[in-house]
Image (cartoon, helix red, strand yellow):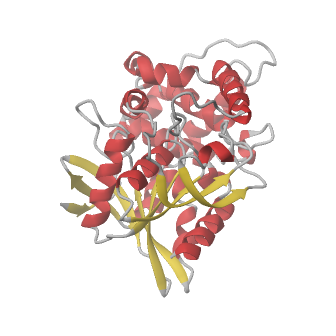
Amino acid sequence: MIKPFSIIVPQEVLDDLKLRLQITRWPDSLAGSGWSYGADLSYMKQLYHYWQHEFDWRKVEREVNAYPNFVADINGHDIHFLHIKGKGKSRLPLLITHGWPGSFLEMMKLIPLLTEDPQASFDLVIPSVPGFGFSGKPTASGCNSAFVAGLWHRLMTELGYERYGAQGGDIGSGISTWLALNHPQNVIGLHLNYISGSYEPYLAEGEERADEFLAFQNTIAEWSAREGAYAYLHATKPLTAAYGLNDSPMGLCAWIIEKFNGWSDNGGDIENAFTKDELLANVTLYWITQTIHSSMRIYNENSKKPLAFRQGEMVKVPVAFAKFPKELPTPPRSYIERGFNIQHWTDMPRGGHFAATEQPGLLAKDIKDFFFSIS
């Protein structure tokens, strides 16, 4: 069952947020340490002041509600999604999936770029992963990326799309990859701007990994030692951290914003990549839906079912990869091609992990170039 949906957060929830912000207890920091120990205290205080006195959640609601929103019951899971039909003479259905610590809000800048071309455009379906945003929270284990891919296929077929494209970054990349693996007869093509961190192509027994991949493994190890603590926590003990993050808005804000700073192409100033309104819209969404724990849990679920290909298994549908320079470590193309049928590869001039928000024009053009070349 699919029902129309509007975002209307009760005023008492927003009032409670303001009250909790007022009684924030701040940590100490070393003078001049900036972001080197985590979320920069001076910047977090700037963001705090803006959140308290200038940020307008109701404006976010109006912007999102201007598009058709729905909630679908898919196999007992409530899935919130936007469904915007393109204006082009030629239209192609496209499912776009977000990751963590993002949300469906990341895709807002893409909507007009992908739907308003009078010649060729997309029918966009932009869902929230279970446990994120206004989708329901899983109540049992097993809601990993492969499971979500099954829900996405059911959603698309219930919307009347037997053949469709898939696009994703971060966790959305893994979900979209599982979708293409498990439903190749339905997926027209797969466009990614990230390769799932658990990805492993099949290697025959005794087969040695190429030197360039061994070098990449060293890069990954160095990155994980420096930046990966959050992922280990999410994959092992997410509930423990969630008590504090779900109770303190500034704690939640720091946990999320530190990633937006560290993973974006911002030249040393986070607001070169995002506005305060964009940052706080995403954080506020996590706060009002109380989804920090349910969103973190997918790391634990995915650790039990990594994207490790068996013998003869690979993504056979046409695949495009958009490589943004400040993305998290990306495997060598030769290693990716062992599991993905790469037909289109773009080395982007700028942009980072949050490509849809950071560089929507570049990402939208690459999506259009790829899908309308294969359709």
Residue 10 in view here: no
Depth order, front residue of 292/323? 323
**Image location of residue 69, percent across then percent down:** 35, 62
In this rendering, position of residue 226 left or right of residue 296: right
Residue 16 against residue 245 in the figure, above or below: below
Residue 375 against residue 314 in the figure, above or below: below
Q: Residue at x 67, y 36 (%)?
A: 329
Q: Residue at x 55, y 86 (%)?
A: 119
**Image location of residue 367, percent across then percent down:** 59, 65
Q: Residue at x 54, y 23 (%)?
A: 230
Q: Residue at x 49, y 43 (%)?
A: 99
**Image location of residue 359, percent across then percent down:** 68, 56
In this rendering, position of residue 269 left or right of residue 63: right
Residue 195 against residue 241 in the figure, above or below: below
Depth order, front residue of 176/75? 176
**Image location of residue 98, percent across then percent down:** 48, 48
